[in-house]
Amino acid sequence: MTQEEKLALLKASGINVNGDLVLEKHVEHEIGNIEAGGIGIQIINGGNTAVKAERQSKRVEAQKLVSDCFTYRWLEEYPERITKLFQALLRAEWISPDTKPDMFQRIFSGKNCDVKVKWTGSQAELWYLFKLLFDRKYVSWPQGVGQWIIVQSHFVDGKSKVFTDFNSQHEPKKVSGVINALAELLNPAVDTETRNS
């Protein structure tokens, strides 16, 4: 019986397959024939999440976190722009109130640092903010170092865990306008004093 036929049989029987479907007998824990002439499948509902989290954690370890930081394009001329971004992220409650301004600024200094900022927003919001900063070339990073590795190295989630899998993130539609405005705080061509009044 093919996989498609087995799935069709399950659906026709009223079985909703929401978990992982193992259609082989060669599984970690051998399963027996359900009944004479049975299908011989195993449905694991949610049992795979711990394995996936462990794999992602190992991927991050394999990528090795770095002390490299970003360089804000106009750091010499407009260092106060980084402070404005910091203050706006703090007001929006996307970074922990424990974050000190100099800690945040070091991430954009172009110098190596071991700063960890607790990002309290969603991973998609962090991804989108940095995607905009990269696309607009407001920040640069050392050659040979992946920009997302730098983000992972300096931003942790609310439980102090490293973010993983930035490739699967999407634009957070509800707050994309807010994040766009935050990214523009680093653009010296935009007069933030006039815009904020």
Image (tube, grey):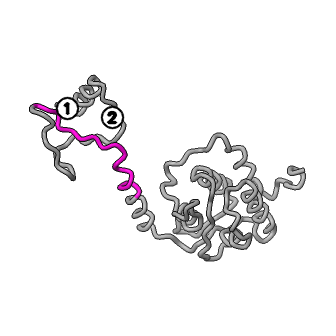
Q: Left or right? Give the position of 26 relative to 12.
A: left
Q: Position of residue 193 (x, y in %)?
A: 88, 55
Q: Left or right? Give the position of 154 relative to 79.
A: left
Label 1 residue SS = loop
Q: Badge 1 is on which residue?
A: 2
Can residue 147 be seen in this snapshot?
A: no
Q: Left or right? Give the position of 37 relative to 144.
A: left
Q: Position of residue 131 (x, y in %)?
A: 61, 53
Instruction: Say above or below: 114 vs 34.
Output: below
Q: Amino acid at mark 2?
A: Val
What residue appears at the point 21 percent right and 38 percent down from the top-left corner? 41
Q: Quadrant of residue 68?
A: bottom right
Is tag 1's residue or tag 2's residue first in the polypeptide sequence? 1
Q: CA distance from mark 1 to mark 2?
A: 16 Å
Q: What residue range appears in magenta?
A: 37-53
Q: Badge 2 is on which residue?
A: 17
What residue appears at the point 84 percent right and 55 percent down from the top-left corner? 192
Q: Position of residue 153 (x, y in %)?
A: 55, 68
- Categorize mark 2 by other alpha carbons within 10 Å: few (<14), some (14-19), many (20+): few
Instruction: Say above or below: 151 vs 23.
Output: below
What residue appears at the point 30 percent right and 44 percent down from the top-left corner? 44
Q: Does the segment drawn in magenta span residue 46?
A: yes
- Foreground residue among 53 and 166: 53
